[in-house]
Image (cartoon, grey):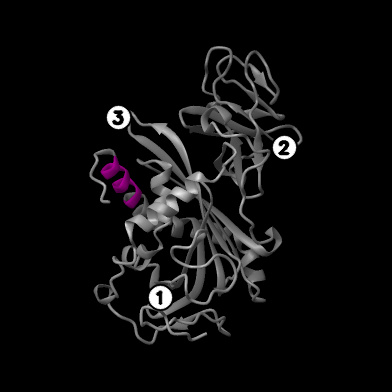
Amino acid sequence: MNSDRSDGRRERPVRRARQPLSLRRNAVAWERQRPIWREARPALIARALKRAQARPSGNWYVVGATAAVPGDRPLARTIAGQEVVVWRDAEGRLVAGPGVCPHLGAPLRDSPVRCGTLVCHWHGLGLRGTAFAGWEPLPVHDDGVLVWVRLDDVGGEPPLDAPVVPVRPAPAGAVSAVYVGVGTCEPEDVVANRLDPWHGAWFHPYSFVDLDVVPATAPQEGGPTGAGDEDGFTVDVSFKVAGRLVVPVRAVFTAPEPRTVLMRITRGEGAGSVVETHATPLGPDEHGRPRTAVVEAVVATSDRPGFAVARRMGPVLRPLMRAAAGRLWRDDLAYAERRWHLRSTGRFPG
């Protein structure tokens, strides 16, 4: 594909090379990149955010990674000010409920699990995941990568039987990792950050180069169309490996529900791989400022024969994948926190 673009630039083709790495021929210094501030229109991002917020969530919130729920202790999180615990019963199934002991209010996050029973460490009250002494279980969902809990009192929407989980690569052919970070902001600030694909090569030059948001008028392949479309943004970008070595891909950003942004690689190396960014409100800090957890699931796949080796190396790769996500989110949480600060003081542009 080598079509002329409406803005006079030629669309950069993204092909699946015989080798995953490419060599940049016309590398430019960071400050000599093409400025994109005119394209990253605040109103455009705001409209995409508004559409995301209008989609149903069914009151489901991401708690954390499936792998973070072992058999001997609970996974705990405060969601919108409510303490929640998730653990495994004697059959290994997930159960969830309030994180406050119904006896004298002990924090159940600190209590162990024995034979599927959550045992309060203050006085030994045992909870098996069924209603007891005013303690009521909560709907919980395990999608194989992430754990969700439904909080109807918090969400206030018509409940759904299951969360809106994006389609992912088959587990048998993928490697997944989950990163968790916390910032002083609200979920909408995290979602707005992810719905601004233009900032990648400027704000994260250590990871992304040659980023181009494809106009909605350009030819598309698979999934939603380009910038300004009702469903998402299409981006041509190269992941930086080392020096001039890069991996060029096409990716589509969409928001399937109010607190989730999905990036799916549609062309190039790793087509079908996804990065899911979930924003879970935690509640205010000691100064009354909102705090939000970013739970990001990376599910990578490839049809290259050598990827089978990568799957077997999952235990080694997962910490590296989490570290890469963490480096990006150290910057992106600063972006989200800055956005919240400006909004909360009435100084946000636009």
Q: Position of residue 298 (x, y in %)?
A: 54, 58
Is residue 278 among the parts visible in the rendering? no
Which mark, residue 287?
Answer: 3
Q: Which residue is at 72% across, 37% downward?
A: 93
- Is disc 1 placed on a helix, strand or loop? strand
Magenta stretch: helix, strand or loop mostly? helix
Between 165 and 303, the one lying in front of the other is 165
Label 2: how many Cα within 10 Å (few below 14, some 14–19, many 20+): few
Q: CA distance from mark 1 to mark 3?
A: 42 Å
Q: In which image quadrant can residue 159 be found?
A: top right
Q: Earlier in the sequence, mark 3 or mark 2?
A: 2
Q: Would you place residue 9 above or below residue 118 in this image?
A: below
Q: CA distance from mark 1 to mark 2?
A: 43 Å
Give the mark count.
3
Q: Earlier in the sequence, mark 1 or mark 3?
A: 1
Q: Earlier in the sequence, mark 1 or mark 2?
A: 2
Which mark, residue 93?
Answer: 2
Q: Which residue is at 39% across, 72% downward?
A: 211
Which mark, residue 242?
Answer: 1
Q: Could you tell me the amino acid type at mark 3?
A: His
Q: Position of residue 95 (x, y in %)?
A: 67, 32
Q: Could you tell me the amino acid type at mark 2?
A: Arg
Q: Which residue is at 57% across, 18% downward?
A: 101
Q: Could you tell me the amino acid type at mark 1?
A: Ala
Q: Please state the extent of the stretch shown in magenta in the rendering.
A: 335-343
Q: Which residue is at 44% across, 54% downward?
A: 48
Q: Position of residue 224 (x, y in %)?
A: 55, 65
Is residue 161 among the parts visible in the rendering? yes
Label 1: how many Cα within 10 Å (few below 14, some 14–19, many 20+): few
For marks 1 and 2, give the one nearer the viewer: 2
